[in-house]
Image (spheres, rainbow, N blue to C red):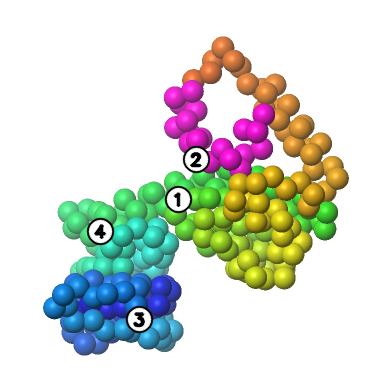
Amino acid sequence: MEYRYDGSYEGLLSCIFCAYQHKTLPIAINAEPDSQPALFDATELIETNEEWAARVLRGIDSRTNGRASHLLYNIFLSELPQREILCFHLVRAITQKGDESILENFANPHVLQAAKIEKMMHREVHRMHAFVRFQKTRTGLFYAAIDPDFNVLPLIGDHFERRYADQPWLILDTRRHYALHYDRVQTSFITLDNPIFTEVGNALQGSIHNDEHLDFQDEKEQQYQELWKNYFHAVNISERNNKKLHLRHVPRRYWKYLTEKSL
C-alpha cells in the first residue's frame, strides 16, 4: 500500500495513524497526491486529520519523554527523499520498544538515519543563527533573506524572538518563498501575497532573483553596513588567513546574504 497526503506535517502523521488503524505496512508515503502511482501498487489518499495527528504525537511522546515529536518534526522539515517512510518506521520502532532508549539504539538503521538527519538540521539551524543579516527598512521593519539547505525557518523563530524582542523583523526563505514575521508581540508565517510584504516588496522579489534593490532601506542602513564591513576588515589578520578552514565554517553558498562578503 502507498499512502498519499497533502504535504503537511499533520497530513503525514495522519498517514501514520491510518497505517496503524488499518494494520498495514506502507511501502511508501508520498506528498504528491496527483502523481502517477507505480505499476501494480495500491494507493490511498489520506485526508489530514488534526486529531489523528495529535494522537500519534501523544503516543510517541509518552514513551520518549517528549523527544520523539521533536525528532520527527526535524526529519519532516529536512525535505530529504523518503523522509515520510522513515518517520513511519521510527514511530513503529518507538511503539514496539516502548521506552526512550530506542532513540539511542543506533543498531536500528532507522534510528541511526534519524540521528544523522537531526544532526544535519541542528547544524543548519546553528548556521542560520550566525549568518542572518538584518537590514532596516524605511518603515522600521528589519528584514533578512536566507536560503538554507533545509526548511529550518520553523526552527529558528524562538532564537530571534528572544534576541530581537524589541523590534519588528521579517526573515524570508528565498528558496521556499515564505517568511517568518515578528510584530513585537508574536511570530507568524506569511507568504508573498501577504500585505506585510508591500513594505519591502521590490527588495523581497530582488532577494529571490538576486537583484539589487536599495530604495527600501532606511537612510542610515548603508552607513551601518559600511561600519560592519570596516570592522570585519579591521579585525582580520591577513597573515593568518586559512581559506580552507574559513570555508568549513562559512560555506560559500551562504555568502550572498552576508554583508561582510559584499566588500
Q: Position of residue 244 (x, y in %)?
A: 44, 24
Residue 200 among magenta residues: no
Crowding at dot 3, Cα within 10 Å, few <14 / some 14-19 / many 20+, comes out as many
Nearer to us of marks 3 and 1 is: 1
Q: CA distance from mark 2 to mark 3?
A: 36 Å
Tag 4, which secondary structure? helix
Earlier sequence position, callout 1 versus callout 2: 1
Residue located at (63% from left, 21% from top): 236
Nearer to us of marks 2 and 4 is: 2
Q: What residue type is disc 3 on?
A: Ser
Tag 2, which secondary structure? helix
Earlier sequence position, callout 3 versus callout 4: 3
Q: Is residue 253 above or below residue 10?
A: above
- Residue, disc 1: 149
Q: What residue type is disc 1 on?
A: Asp
Q: CA distance from mark 1 to mark 2?
A: 9 Å
The image's mark for residue 253 is: 2
Residue located at (49% from left, 23% from top): 243
Q: What residue type is disc 4 on?
A: Val
Residue located at (71% from left, 56% from top): 202
Crowding at dot 2, Cα within 10 Å, few <14 / some 14-19 / many 20+, comes out as few
Foreground residue, 227 or 99?
227
- Residue, disc 4: 111
The image's mark for residue 25 is: none
Q: CA distance from mark 3 to mark 1?
A: 26 Å
Q: Position of residue 13 (x, y in %)?
A: 36, 77
Nearer to us of marks 3 and 4 is: 3
Q: CA distance from mark 1 to mark 4?
A: 22 Å
Q: Which residues are magenta?
A: 243-263
Residue located at (71% from left, 30% from top): 229
Earlier sequence position, callout 2 versus callout 3: 3
